[in-house]
Image (tube, rainbow, N blue to C red):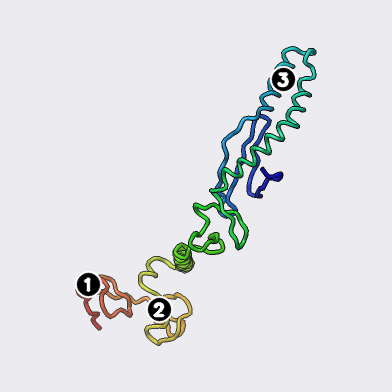
Amino acid sequence: MSDTIRFVRNYHDQSTDKGFQFEFFCDRCGTGHRTRFNASVSGTVSGLLDTAGGLLGGIFGSAARVGDSVRSVTWEKGHDAAFESAVEEVKPEFVQCPHCSKWVCRESCFNDRKGLCKECAPDLGVEMAAAQMSKSREEIWAHAAMAEEDKKLSTEVWREGIRATCPQCKAPLNQNVKFCPECGANTKTEAFCTNCGAKMSATAKFCGECGEKKQE
């Protein structure tokens, strides 16, 4: 057995006086593996001494100090052995990327085909799907932003459409108005289909309901 214990930074030590337990997690996704709790012999001995001291008072008044001494030596040795064993236990679950040196989980964050973590060698299928969804999301937000502008207009006006020029003098209309500021003509002239009676816009050539051609 080596005199040193190889360890990594991506772990949490959950050990207590009662025993040893460690958590190791992926540098990329955070998925972790926790070792099973391993009871400490020194912790058990210390607990017995503390209990004896509490029951018998002055006779074993130094029991707590003896327990601390047991923990400081035996516990530390047990902790080192448990940690070394834990590292070996979880090692198959992780792999170190040769490019960025991160420790990542084999299950989700390592690209076996490329021999690199998925941060350095992303799954192209996943990236393509994510790119497509990102583009779709941008289009949805752009549409929603346009719809917010449309909300300033009434529902009826939106159905009828907005004229860019006056139907009478063809002057440009910079805003939604009922009468032309140049000639005074009514820009909201209503028309109805002679076949089905549906309302038609002034510029429509065919009825949107039945397809009948507009009578001039």
Q: Position of residue 152 (x, y in %)?
A: 47, 67
Task: Bin the neighbour count of mark 3 within 10 Å (Cα to Cα): few under 14, some 14-19, many 20 and up.
Answer: many
Residue 163: give its label: 2
Q: In the rendered structure, which disc, 2 or 1, sits on the residue that comes first in sequence?
A: 2
Q: In the rendered structure, which disc, 3 or 1, sits on the residue that comes first in sequence?
A: 3
- Measure the alpha-carbon separation of dots 2 and 3: 93 Å
- Residue depicted at 65% across the width and 30% down the height: 40
The foreground one among 84 and 121 is 84
The kind of secondary structure element at disc 1 is: loop
Q: Residue furthest left?
A: 195
- Measure the alpha-carbon separation of dots 3 and 1: 96 Å
- Measure the alpha-carbon separation of dots 2 and 1: 23 Å
Q: Kindly identify the amino acid type of the residue bearing the numbered disc 3.
A: Leu
Q: Is residue 112 above or below residue 59?
A: below
Of tags 2 and 3, the one toward the viewer is 3
* Residue at mark 3: 49
CB within 8 Å, label 3 to label 1? no
* Residue at mark 1: 210
Of tags 3 and 1, the one toward the viewer is 3
The foreground one among 51 and 6 is 6
Q: Is residue 88 above or below residue 170?
A: above
Q: Position of residue 8 (x, y in %)?
A: 65, 49
The kind of secondary structure element at disc 2 is: loop
Which quadrant, please, contains the C terminus?
A: bottom left
